[in-house]
Image (cartoon, rainbow, N blue to C red):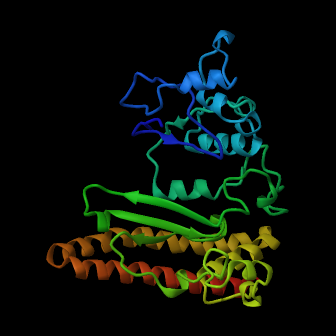
Amino acid sequence: ARRVKDDEVAIIANTFSIREVDMNDKENFICPTDLVEYAIKRGWYDPDSGEKFDFAKAYAPEKVHTSLSNTHRQWNMARLLNKNFSITLEESEKGMMPVSVKPDRKLSLKDVMEIFRNHYEGTVLDKSQKYKTSPHKTPGTICNYGTHRTTVVQQRNWLPPEIGTVTWRALDQPCSSVFVPWYLGATRIPEAFRKAPESLYTTKRDLLDYHFNVPKETWRLDMESASAVFTLLGEIVDADYKRAIGNVRKTWKEFEMLEFMLQPVIEESALKLFKQDKALAMEFLTLYSSSQALKSLETAKNLIDEIK
C-alpha cells in the first residue's frame, strides 16, 4: 500500500497501480520485507536487467498491466484531472501511468461526478461519432455498460460525521442517472431503494433447485424497484443515445444543481438540530435523503415515459 498525497488523486483500474516502492519509507509505504525477493524468485523481476523494481510491472500479468481497457481509462481520468498531464496516450498503453495525479484545480463535487460520466468525448478514443451510436459501445470508457452504481463520498471534518459525511450515489450508468445525497446520519432507506430481484445470493430456496429452476418473477420488471427503473432508463437512452441523452442530462443537471444549492441550507438546519437533539437531526436528514431519492425515482419514471 502507498499513501496518496493530500493534493493528489489515485487512479486505479483493474490492475495494480503502485510503481516504485521505498521499503524504508514506513510513513508512506506498507509492504512485506521480501517483496522484491519474492518477485525475483518467481521470475517476475531480474535485478541484473538494469531496471528499477516496478511493483505493478512485476506483480501484474503483462496482459492486464497493459490492457487498453485499463490504460485508456487511467489516461482519460488523468487528463480530466489535469489538462497538462504529460504522459501521452501511447505511453500509457505501455503501462507507464503513475499511481496518482495532482489535479490542476480544486475539484468540486460536480467535477468528480462529470468525470465518472465520461466516454472519451473529444479524444481519438471516442468511437461514438458524436453519439451516432451509444458511447458505451466504445471499449474501456469510465462510464460503461457495466456501471451499475457510482459513488462519490464527501467528507468534512469540521462537521459532525452524521452531517459532514455524504454518500452521493447514482444508480446504473451515471450519464443517464442522477447523484442523490445519502447522509451518514440517515437511519432509513425507502423500500424502493432496497428492493432487488431474487438471486442466488438472496434466495431462501434450495440453491441447486434455484440454479436450475430460476423463478419467472426474477426476470419481471419491477417498476417499484429503483434499481430496475434506472436500469430501464439507461437501456432506453442507449437505444437512441443521440436523441435521448440531451433531455435526460438537462433534467438531471437541474436536479443536481438544486441539490447543491440546498445542501448548505439543509446542513445548517441539521447542525442546529444536532446541537439540541441528535435523534431529531438524524430524522431530519433521513427525511431529506429519502425525499430526494423518491423524487429522483419519480423523475426517472417520467423520463422513461417521455423518451420510450
Question: Viewer-proximal residue, 162 or 81?
Answer: 162
Question: Viewer-proximal residue, 295 or 277?
Answer: 277
Q: Position of residue 237 (x, y in %)?
A: 75, 73
Q: How many numbered dots are placed on residues in this image? A: 0
Q: Look at the picture and state if 33 lies above or below 155.
A: above
| Residue 78 location, quadrant | top right
Q: Is residue 116 left or right of residue 278?
A: right
Q: Position of residue 26 (x, y in %)?
A: 37, 28
Q: Residue at x 65, y 85 (%)?
A: 205
| Residue 130 location, quadrant | bottom right
Q: Residue at x 45, y 24 (%)?
A: 23
Q: Position of residue 25 (x, y in %)?
A: 39, 24
| Residue 288 location, quadrant | bottom left
Q: Look at the picture and state if 109 lies above or below 277.
A: above
Q: Quadrant of the C terminus?
A: bottom right
Q: Position of residue 153 (x, y in %)?
A: 44, 59
Extreme residue in the left direction: 276
Q: Residue at x 75, y 84 (%)?
A: 219
Q: Look at the picture and state if 7 lies above or below 297.
A: above
Q: Is residue 229 left or right of residue 158?
A: right
Q: Look at the picture and state if 45 lies above or below 216.
A: above
